Amino acid sequence: MDDCIFCQIVAGDIPSRTVYEDATTKAFLDANPLAPGHTLVIPKDHHEHVQDMPVGVAGDVFATVHRLVAPVQDAVGAEGSTVAFNNGEVAGQEVPHAHCHIVPRFTEDGSAPIHSIFGERPDIADDELDDIAGDIADDVSE
Ligand code: 5GP
Ligand code: ZN
């Protein structure tokens, strides 16, 4: 993907503050960090969404996230982190190459849990919840 920023980072055409890489994944500091230490973990191959990654690659990405969380937090003295994907444009994904954010968190950083981006919770009837759970369960086992 010639016009993908993250593919260009993988290729070395755009510089990055790389903190870890292996055969299938790369991790580097976010250029516009939400907090000191804000790190992105990506698959080296271009896949737009979480569900587009082959399961093995998705496992490799998560293994890198798992490996990096403590070093990222420790580097900046954070007590926790928000670990998240913006998955799809509607969810705020701006770079169309799947990436996991590790954002260090501090007691008084003025931020909030991921739940806070959703505002008021929808009132969903029990039978609708049953239908949704059934649809997901049917689809995932196909
Ligand atoms: P998204 O909104 O797609 O989940 O997040 C994309 C992230 O990529 C943003 O936090 C943004 O700051 C970061 N970003 C965009 N372009 C570059 C770049 O060229 N280099 C690095 N290191 N980060 C980038
Ligand atoms: Zn890409």
Image (cartoon, helix red, strand yellow):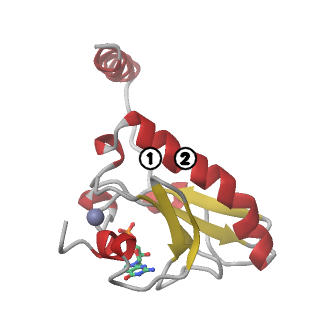
Query: Nearest the camera: 137 or 30?
Result: 30
- Residue 135, how many percent across, how many down? 29, 19
Does residue 45 sit above or below 8 in this rendering? above
The quadrant holding residue 106 is bottom right
Task: State how far apart marks 1 and 2 are (Cα).
Answer: 29 Å
Amino acid bearing label 1: Arg
**In this image, 46 relative to 69: left or right?**
left
Q: Is mark 2 within 8 Å of ligand 1?
A: no
Query: Nearest the camera: 123 or 10?
Result: 10
> Which residue is tagged 2?
62
Residue at 18%, 72% in the rendered image: 2
Q: Quadrant of the C terminus?
A: top left
The reply to whether residue 85 is in sight is yes
> Which residue is tagged 1?
121
The reply to whether residue 96 is in sight is no
Amino acid bearing label 2: Phe
Does residue 9 sit above or below 63 in this rendering? below
**In this image, 100 relative to 6: left or right?**
right
Callout 1 touching callout 2 (CB < 8 Å) = no
Secondary structure of the residue carrying tag 2 is helix
Observer-side mark, 1 or 2, equals 2
Secondary structure of the residue carrying tag 1 is loop
Residue at 39%, 42% in the rendered image: 122
Whichever of callouts 1 and 2 sits on the residue coming sooner in the sequence is: 2
Q: Which residue is most to the front?
A: 23
